[in-house]
Image (spheres, rainbow, N blue to C red):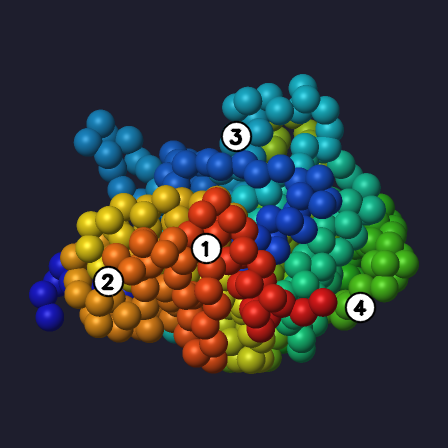
Amino acid sequence: MALITKKIKGTEDVLPKQSYRWQFVENIMREEARSYGFKEIRTPVFEHTELFARGVGQTTDVVQKEMYTFDTKGGESVTLRPEGTAGAARAVLEHALENEGLPIKASYFVSCYRYEKPQAGRLREFHQFGIEEYGTQSPAADAEIICLAQSVLDRLGLSQVHLEINSIGCPACRAKYNQALREYFGQYKDKLCNTCQTRLEKNPMRLLDCKSPEDHKLAEGAPKITDYLCEECENHFAEVRKYLDAAGVEYIVNPSIVRGLDYYTKTVFEFITDSIGAQGTVCGGGRYDGLIEELGGKHMPSLGFAMGLERVLMVMDAQGIEIPDTDKTALYIATMGDAAKVKAFTLLRNVRQCGLIAETDVVGRGLRAQMKYADKIGAQYSMVLGDNEIETNTAKVKNMETGAQTELALDESFADKFAVLQLADDQSFEI
Ligand code: HAM
């Protein structure tokens, strides 16, 4: 097959007949975020490379191995966003959003780009729904965003997804912990992968989420951050758990959750499922109290999470969760003759104004071919409009599934009457 008709490895198309599934999921996410007071932010797909290097962290897999980075014709190094947090933080700083009051609450849908080895649930272009909150150090905020993620997953009907939480401390407790990690991994230095050998000095916590199987095994015996938390971080973590308990959100404390990005401090969490194989993390997030400062702003404790849309959809598929197809054509008007074509335009406009999907022939096909097409697109009702119907000013709409026919007048009442009929017959409509 010619190169131009093949998509790039690790990317996926969403085709017209599947997009209702994405929109269903996105609508629930959007509504939930809105109900917690988060407003949408949209930032560019590419940013200065430096933003991710500084924000996400030089020693992360994302920055070291996975970024799509290129020089522009003007000689600038730019990078396709590997995640949404750094870009949103940059925008908050650039537009001084703190002047509008704290906390700042933003949500987003972004496409992300990581040069990872593609496999089920791991793509090179993927999509995230995320939220970020800036300007609060309260543990109530941590618990609240976790509740938000949980409500999204609940509303989508996902089961067998569990929440794991941890605290990875602040720079003060991290310093002692890093030392303990250096001592532990130092014993096995020769066994570590090349990347981790260099990370050992600079950022030993990164060894804990290395993808190499040998390093992964060694990481199991490593000291746990929870034994090194300072009093403030320990109290903060206890408070987060207290709020989660009060909200009835179930969780497991897993001291091995460290997350793969450098900006995290204190609370980190992941929602994980066994339903879709090895790439089972559907949502990840946490607190990042130092990021805004790292990017040149004032101290502004912040937090957030992102959910992978492809993974959420995979889980829904695997668990047989049905998504209602709201893109079904309600009425297809097949026409014979010019007068019918013109009449159809008026009727269709009125039906569409009722919020229903309505179509007619714009190819110039004969009646049989038009009906075949109506069948193919799964139209719920069809109607034939010819000279006869124009003359009597009535036509029969036919329920394509049951074959039942209803005669309707082709006047101003047509659209309303059709809408009532459609609503009453619609099998997904339950009182
Ligand atoms: P992350 O854990 O790198 O965190 O990604 C968040 C979610 O995106 C993952 O849990 C997963 O569902 C999805 N995801 C990640 N990589 C891939 C991939 N290659 N293919 C498919 N899905 C993927 C972040 O990106 C942080 N920015 C989250 C955050 C926001 N933390 C604070 N605020």
Q: Amino acid at mark 3?
A: Ala
Q: Is mark 3 within 8 Å of ligand 1?
A: no
> Is 288 displayed left or right of 360 in the figure?
right
Amino acid type at circle 4 is Glu
- For image coordinates 63% across by 42% down, the residue present is 132
161 shown above or below 336: below
Using the numbered discs, state the Cα–Cα distance from disc 3 to disc 1 in whole angstroms.
56 Å
- The residue nearer to you, when weighing 278 against 429, is 429
Reading the image, the residue beneath label 2 is 7
Spatial CA span between label 3 and label 2: 32 Å
Image coordinates for residue 58, horizontal then vertical, percent = 46, 46
Q: Which residue is mark 4?
A: 250
Within 10 Å of disc 3 (Cα), the crowding (few <14, some 14-19, many 20+) is: some
- The residue shown at (86%, 54%) is 243
- Label 1 and label 4: CA atoms lie apart by 57 Å
Q: Position of residue 252 (x, y in %)?
A: 76, 70
Q: Residues within 10 Å of mark 4 (few under 14, many from 20)?
A: few
Indicate the position of residue 372 as horizontal and vertical percent values. Answer: 26, 73
Marks 1 and 4 in Cβ contact (< 8 Å): no
Disc 1 residue type?
A: Ala
Q: Quadrant of the N terminus?
A: bottom left
Sooner in the amino-acid sequence: mark 2 or mark 1: 2
Res. 143 mark? none
Mark 4 to mark 2 CA distance (whole Å): 41 Å
Q: CA distance from mark 2 to mark 1?
A: 49 Å
Q: Which residue is mark 3?
A: 91
Tell me which amino acid carries mark 2. Answer: Lys
Q: Nearer the viewer, mark 1 or mark 4?
A: 1
Q: Which residue is mark 1?
A: 409
Q: Tell which tag, 3 or 1, sits nearer the viewer.
A: 1
Q: CA distance from mark 3 to mark 4?
A: 34 Å
Disc 3 or 2, which lies upstream in sequence?
A: 2
